[in-house]
Image: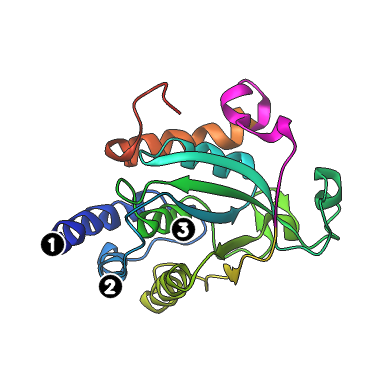
Amino acid sequence: MRNSKTIYLLHLSILLLTFVTACGQRNSQKKITQTTNNMTNEVNNNELDTALFGAGCFWCVEAMFQRLDGVVKVESGYAGGHMVSPTYKDVCNGTTGHAEVCRITFDPKKVSYETLLSIFWQTHDPTTLNRQGNDVGTQYRSAIFYYNDIQMQLAEKYKSELNASGAFSNPIVTEITAINNYYSAEDYHQNYYNQNSEQSYCQFVIAPKVEKLEKVFKDKLKLKGSH
């Protein structure tokens, strides 16, 4: 089992440099491979688990993780702030402290938390503070909200080793913190890309990311039409 997992992580890490954003993230595949191979901890494989990631606009994050085999549900929401039950307007004002996030329910027998972390760091720029592309503000910060010590240790170790490896030309600024609150976003934000693929933001920002995901991780995706 351990050897199969190691081979799988090696294969996944080799794909990393074909997927990173164009912000100087072009260092050697060998360093990424070494980092990923060091991730040997495992999450609970007996039941569904939950991950909570912020990586810019939650429409983008949702569209990515919905397509992964083993992901049961992705819900857009807000986390990490101080206001109770914030609205989208509140969060966009940048005064509530919340980040746009996606809560990912997954089957660890099919997809590991380590794999979700790897895809998380590959599908956005974790070196830009409070910004992803033209989306600017603390609500768009790179963030991992962990639910238990295992998730914390995996996230911290992965971040540390990526920084040490020089995989990115700038330091990773991803916030790693315990989940202290989470609020579901409004209904019109849920399943946004799938229901609004003709909208301009979806076509120009989300669609290219989805296309790359589908090419690079085609063997990790659900069957077409099942997300």
From the image, tell me which residue sits under label 2. Answer: 38
Residue 8 point in image, percent of width and height? 21, 54
Residue under the image location 36 percent in, 41 percent down: 70
* Colouring rule applied to residues: rainbow
Residue 227 point in image, percent of width and height? 46, 29
From the image, tell me which residue sits under label 1. Answer: 3
How far, Cα to Cα, is label 1 from label 2? 13 Å
Is disc 1 in contact with disc 3, using a CB cutoff of under 8 Å? no
Give the numbered dot on residue 183. none
Q: Is residue 197 visible in the rendered structure shown here?
A: no
Q: Is residue 147 left or right of residue 76?
A: left
Q: Quadrant of the N terminus?
A: bottom left
Query: For the residue marked with disc 3, what is the amino acid?
Result: Trp
Crowd class of label 1 (few under 14; some 14 to 19; many from 20; radius 10 Å): few
How far, Cα to Cα, is label 1 from label 3? 24 Å
In the current view of this chain or complex, which residue is farthest to the front?
46
Residue under the image location 73 percent in, 56 percent down: 139
Q: Which residues are magenta?
A: 182-201
Q: What kind of element bears circle 2?
A: loop
From the image, tell me which residue sits under label 3. Answer: 121
* 133 over 62 or under it: above or below: below
Q: Is residue 186 left or right of residue 147?
A: right
Query: For the residue marked with disc 2, what is the amino acid?
Result: Asn
Residue under the image location 68 percent in, 66 percent down: 180
Crowd class of label 3 (few under 14; some 14 to 19; many from 20; radius 10 Å): many
Nearest to the observer: residue 25 or residue 81: 81
Mark 1 or mark 2, earlier in chain = 1
